[in-house]
Image (cartoon, helix red, strand yellow):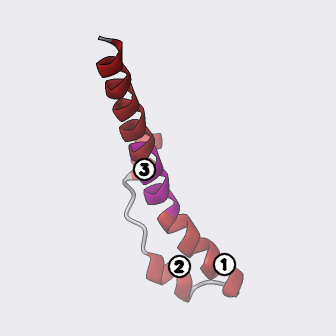
Amino acid sequence: MLLYSLFQNIDIKEKIENAPDKSYEIGVFIGSFLPFVILVIIAYLIYKHNKNRLKNEEHGR
């Protein structure tokens, strides 16, 4: 179910046109970019963790 919701085709333009007010439009905009921002943050944290791990292994030898 979660996997299906991640790959749904969401028509942002249609949602904005049918929006009741301006705050809904802002929420749709933020909600559409939030998953990408979270993925970038996770990727950066993994990169930083692995970089520090390799640095510590070099000094430990």
Q: Main secondary structure of the magenta part?
A: helix
For label 2, the residue is 15
Above/below status of 44 relative to 34: above
For label 1, the residue is 24
Q: Is residue 1 visible?
A: no
Q: Is residue 31 visible?
A: yes
Name the residue at 41% across, 53% down. Answer: 40
Q: Amino acid at mark 3?
A: Leu
Name the residue at 35% across, 31% down. Answer: 50
Q: Are marks 3 and 1 in contact (CB under 8 Å)?
A: no
Q: Earlier in the sequence, mark 3 or mark 2?
A: 2
Q: Residues within 10 Å of mark 1 (few under 14, many from 20)?
A: some
| Magenta segment boundaries in residue numbering | 34-43
For label 3, the residue is 39
- Residue 12, how many percent across, how many down? 46, 76
- Residue 36, how many percent across, how many down? 43, 58
Q: Residues within 10 Å of mark 2 (few under 14, many from 20)?
A: few
Residue 40 counted in the magenta span: yes
Place residue 57 in its image quadrant.
Answer: top left
Residue 39 counted in the magenta span: yes
Nearer to us of marks 1 and 2 is: 1
Tell me the element at label 1: helix
Depth check, front residue: 7 or 31: 31
Q: Amino acid at mark 2?
A: Lys
Q: Amino acid at mark 1?
A: Tyr
Tell me the element at label 3: helix
**Disc 3 and disc 1: Cα gap in Å?**
24 Å
Nearer to us of marks 3 and 2 is: 3
Question: In the picture provided, is 8 more to the left or to the right than 35?
Answer: left
Above/below status of 33 relative to 59: below
Assign the C terminus to one quadrant of the image. top left
Nearer to us of marks 3 and 1 is: 3
